[in-house]
Image (cartoon, coloured by chain):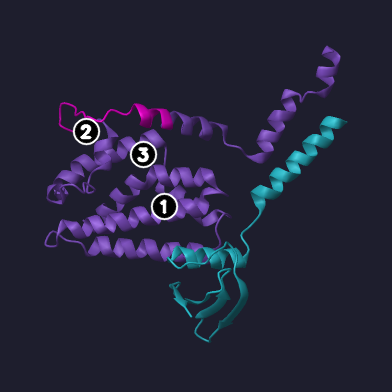
Amino acid sequence: MRHIWLTTAVVMICYSSSTSAVTPAEDIAATIMLRGHPCGGKEVTNIAESEDAAGNKRITATCPNGKKYRIDVSADGEVVVTAL
Amino acid sequence: MDTYIQRNSIQPQYVLLIVLWCGIPLSGLAEGMRDEVDVADEPTISTTDSEGIPTDTSDCNSVGTDTSEPTQLTTSDDSDTTGSACRSTIDDSAGLNIDQLIERIKQTKAIGFLTKLALKGDVEQIIRQVTEYSGQRADQELLQVRQQFEGLVLKAITLLGEKDPGLAQDIYKARHFVWQSMLEVKT
């Protein structure tokens, strides 16, 4: 009985860690850092999104270091990060 | 005492079950350890077979990357012969497939959609730069593009490292093969 509980606990921990998807806040922070901008952490806050009629998306977010960034995602998939 | 140990120790079948559920790639770990040993034991002097094709993959890795003497970059004809031999060696030894690798990057949950899009843009930019490269330009430019590519690979590995180490390891292994493929797109 003890083994069953132990196995179940380990399996649940492993399962949750292997299937945890990236949150939008982590995704945006990773994109900012990928483009060489300092962010100071793995998650951004104050995320605001807008999309125009042509399908171009504009995201603004604040990094843990206090810097604000704008991420423009064009309809054809081009990603541009601009420090505000 | 024996009974106590038997009662309190984890049975092998449970360990196996845990390993299977967690998806720990035992073969990948073993392969990684073997690679580390191989790298450590790798001879620094390259060897060639009777046709002059290097049998050591360290020569393949240096095609188009020799920063000490950029003027000694191989010509397209040379790189075709040597490159294909090296490519097959790397591809066979690592068991890698670029299409599968791309598909795995698309499917992985370790990085988000926006990050994947940004990575894709960076890769396309490097491919564009390699395509624009021609014999008239200085070889130094190709070396700079190669450095950008290596930097991008490192960034991707860093992003994947924590959540998808298997994919990160495979990208690291495949980087020379991917670079060779990019050079072939150029020609």
For the C terminus of chain B, the quadrant is bottom left
Q: Mark 1 sits on what residue?
A: B154
Residue stretch in magenta: B36-54
Query: What amino acid is at disc 1?
Result: Leu
Seen from this angle, which residue lies furthest bottom? Answer: A53
- Give the letter of the chain under mark 1: B
Q: Colour of chain B?
A: purple
Query: Does A78 sit left or right of A61 as displayed?
Result: left
| Badge 3: residue crowd in 10 Å (few <14, some 14–19, many ≥20) | some
Question: Foreground residue, B59 or A66?
Answer: A66
Question: At numbered mark 1, what does the secondary structure look like: helix, strand or loop?
Answer: helix
Pointer 1 and pointer 3: residues touching (CB < 8 Å)? no
Query: What amino acid is at disc 3?
Result: Asp
Query: Does B43 sit left or right of A58 as displayed?
Result: left
Residue B153, position as x, y percentages in the image: 40, 53
Pointer 2 and pointer 3: residues touching (CB < 8 Å)? no
Residue A77, position as x, y percentages in the image: 45, 72
Q: Colour of chain A?
A: cyan
For the N terminus of chain B, the quadrant is top right
Pointer 1 and pointer 2: residues touching (CB < 8 Å)? no
The residue located at (49%, 84%) in the rendering is: A54
Report, in whole angstroms, how far the alpha carbon at label 1 lies from the one at label 3: 20 Å
- Give the letter of the chain under mark 2: B
Seen from this angle, which residue lies furthest top? Answer: B2
Q: Is residue A74 visible?
A: no
Question: At numbered mark 3, what does the secondary structure look like: helix, strand or loop?
Answer: helix
Query: Does A16 sit left or right of B24 as displayed?
Result: right
Q: Mark 3 sits on what residue?
A: B91
Q: Mark 2 sits on what residue?
A: B54
Residue B10: which quarter of the image?
Answer: top right
